[in-house]
Amino acid sequence: MKNPFLSRVADNEKSDYVTASCSVNRVRLAKLPLYGIEDDIEGLTVKEFFCTQLFIDEIKKNADILRIDLSGVNEKKLPKILAKRLDDEDENVANAAKNIVKKFGNRLGLLFLALKKGEPENRLAREDWTNEHWDYWSQISDIILVGGLASGRIGEILREQVNEIFSMANTTPYNIFLYDNSADVGVLGCATQISEKDGVNVVMDFGQTNIKRCFVTKSNGQIIDVKPLEPYPSQYMDWKMPSDEERLRQAQKLHKYLIRAIEDTYNEAKTHTGTEPNREIVISIASYTVDGVLNDERSGYSKLCSLGKNYAECLWWDLSGRLRKDVVVKLIHDGTAIALNFGDRKNTICLSLGSFFGVGFPETKLIWDFN
């Protein structure tokens, strides 16, 4: 069936974009598809019962039994610490760690089951979805899980719990696929959009938590090396501003920070390789993006719309001046960047478990038109 979450770019009839309606975070479980598991999440939206911060909060509440000293620890690293505790020699510690992951696995399973069944109460609670949107979720067969929370043992336990929920409901489950190093698939997806057959290109991933940086080397049309660099922490991510003036001020600060991150990456790539990077700069961004135009309502990057209608053009203008060359900026929705790795997959949705859920569709086609 036709994907109701995809539309065509107005000025480019061969290129798709993911609409903001694809968001899983705004699904509300008005009615649980199965009771007796996590009944207290009934009535909540997904972002209210499943996100990285809630995961972190649960770890902090159980820090003593997990033997985690919270003093001086960056809380963003707690999921990785928890993953190590899953195989702790102390059975009490290992069980406590597993119970946390199972709790969120149950929640994930209830979400997927609700999407699969599409019960009337939940359909009515999602006003921007029609029956076509719910039917699309019902007919897909595969879900690819990526991102920090989908990696390693945590991802495996999440999948086990999802399958158990479907078994209890006597419902055919989605086929859930996990991948090693899945936290980096967005960068790898961006790399597929480099048109140059040879040379070095800068590739970035603007997330809500971190800015991932790397450069990609190609030879005869093939990617031969992906060199990750130290990520930068995402800054100026507040998106609800008290006034338009403050929104603009924060947008200017964020833009300046992003320009510096790109310029630093460019210069580091030049130093590492001894080669001037190519003019294409490919960037994944945690925002719904239509041909360089960002969504102006959601995510910490939405404020960048204050700088101009087309943010890719803003980046092009400033970077071309600072790097002293006419660059090409390709700006890609982060979920779409992930899905670009799986372009041959049918009946498949990609979900990234980052700060919140990100969504991508392998069938998305990107055609770039630069004069």
Image: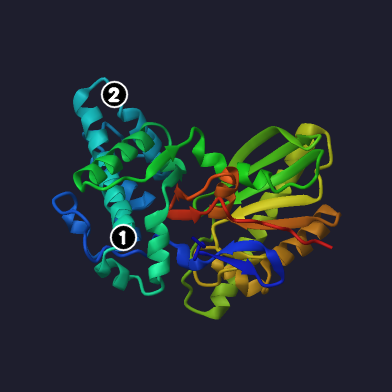
At 35% from the left edge and 59% from the top edge, which residue is drawn?
47
**Residue projecting furthest to the top:** 89
Local crowd at mark 2 within 10 Å, few (<14), some, or many (≥20)? some
Residues at circles 1 and 2 in contact by the CB criterion of under 8 Å: no
Residue 73 visible, this orientation: no
Residue 289 percent coordinates (x, y): 60, 64
Q: Secondary structure at mark 2?
A: loop
Residue designated by label 2: 88
Spatial separation of the CA atoms under disc 1 and disc 2: 30 Å
Residue 341 percent coordinates (x, y): 59, 43
Three-letter amino acid code at disc 1? Answer: Glu
Residue 317 percent coordinates (x, y): 78, 64
Local crowd at mark 1 within 10 Å, few (<14), some, or many (≥20)? few
Hey, which quadrant is residue 44 in on the image? Answer: bottom left
Look at the picture and state if 219 lies above or below 341.
above
Look at the picture and state if 205 lies above or below 131.
above
Query: What colouring method underlies this structural image?
Result: rainbow
Look at the picture and state if 77 lies above or below 53.
above
With 171 as the anchor, is 266 left or right in this view?
A: right
Q: Quadrant for the C terminus, please.
A: bottom right
Lower position in the chain sequence, tag 1 or tag 2: 1
Residue 79 visible, this orientation: yes
With 196 as the anchor, is 132 left or right in this view?
A: left
Q: Secondary structure at mark 1?
A: helix
At 48% from the left edge and 50% from the top edge, which residue is drawn?
347
Hey, which quadrant is residue 306 in on the image? Answer: bottom right
Three-letter amino acid code at disc 2? Answer: Asp
Residue designated by label 1: 48
**Residue projecting furthest to the front:** 1
With 117 as the anchor, is 296 left or right in this view?
A: right
Residue 255 percent coordinates (x, y): 65, 62
